Image (cartoon, rainbow, N blue to C red):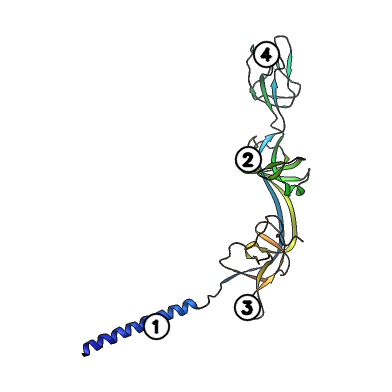
Amino acid sequence: MSSKRKSKLKKRIFMIVAVVIVLLLVVGVALQPKKTSYESVDAKTGDINTYYTFSGNVETKNRETVLSESVLQMKDIKVKEGDIVKEGDVLFTTTTDDKIKAKINGEVSKINVEENAQVMAGTSLMEIVDYDNLQISVKVDEYDMAELKVGEEATVSIGAIDKEVNGTIQSISKEGQVVNGVTFFTAVIDLAKDEDVRVGMSAEVKVAGESAKSVVILPMNVIQFDNNNQPYVYLMDDKGKVVNTTITTGINDGTNVEITSGINSGDVVYYKDNSSTTSGGFGFGGRNGGNNQ
């Protein structure tokens, strides 16, 4: 074999050996156990307040559609659209000198007839709306019924005017309606008078639920759940190793959770930096399903 061919063979062998070494290094690195990266947060003492929220639209408590009770002919229309009337005020007179009066206090929103017009029985003559006494009707899930009480205060947020208005639960229906297999009851919330609020505006009603004062709290995303839905967190032991620690949870507000046992305020809790959500489940505004003590 010539010296030239021997040189080429040595180069090929060297290249093969180099490739094998590189592959072995890559495989070795890949097979090494990955080190888990943790973030940390301190358990703190704080307050948690829960709320129940419902959606609805502003409506008036009182509205009258003035109807003709018989065939008649109009003589005089005593009011115009936009006028404020009181119960008992004369709205129309007829050619037979009969007087048609308002039955509620409110504003004349629409007049449907003209003077000297002849109308049939049951004809809509006028609409009167009470814009001073407004309310909202909301659907309440049967499982939230126990948390609502007649006379309880509520906060009503109206997005269209970026405003919160005080409200009071005026009534709760005694008979529910079944919608897609879920039973709902109707709660009516009276609104405090506010000139900016208009009939038809959409609103969110917020009613206070449970609360816990000066308790140990943690962010929801640091809590894990095992296969039995038992909550736990990661703490560091005396040897510097991160270990599972079982906890008991109380109420939560959708962001923070009350910790009733397992850790103390000031404890450093670790969590995996790729864990954006809990592996179990919390019911918003309530307790963890496995810990309803």
- On the image, the x and y values in percent for residue 222 come to 63, 65
Q: Nearer the viewer, mark 3 or mark 1?
A: 1
- 180 and 207: which is toward the camera: 180
Q: Is residue 70 left or right of residue 274?
A: right
Q: Which residue is mark 3?
A: 241
Secondary structure of the residue carrying numbered label 1: helix
Query: Label 1 amino acid?
Result: Ile
Distance in Å between CA atoms under marks 1 and 4: 107 Å
Report crowding for label 1: few under 14, some 14 to 19, many 20 or more residues within 10 A (C-alpha). Answer: few
Distance in Å between CA atoms under marks 3 and 2: 53 Å
* Residue lying at 74% horizontally and 63% vertically, measured from the top left: 215
The C terminus lies in quadrant? bottom right
Secondary structure of the residue carrying numbered label 4: strand
Please, which residue is most extreme toward the front here?
1
* Residue lying at 70% horizontally and 43% vertically, measured from the top left: 184
Mark carried by residue 202: 2
Q: Which residue is mark 1?
A: 21
Mark carried by residue 46: none
User: Looking at the rendering, which quadrant does residue 196 occupy?
Assistant: top right
Q: Which residue is mark 4?
A: 76
Which circle's residue, 4 or 3, is located before the other in the chain? 4
Q: Is residue 226 left or right of residue 37?
A: right
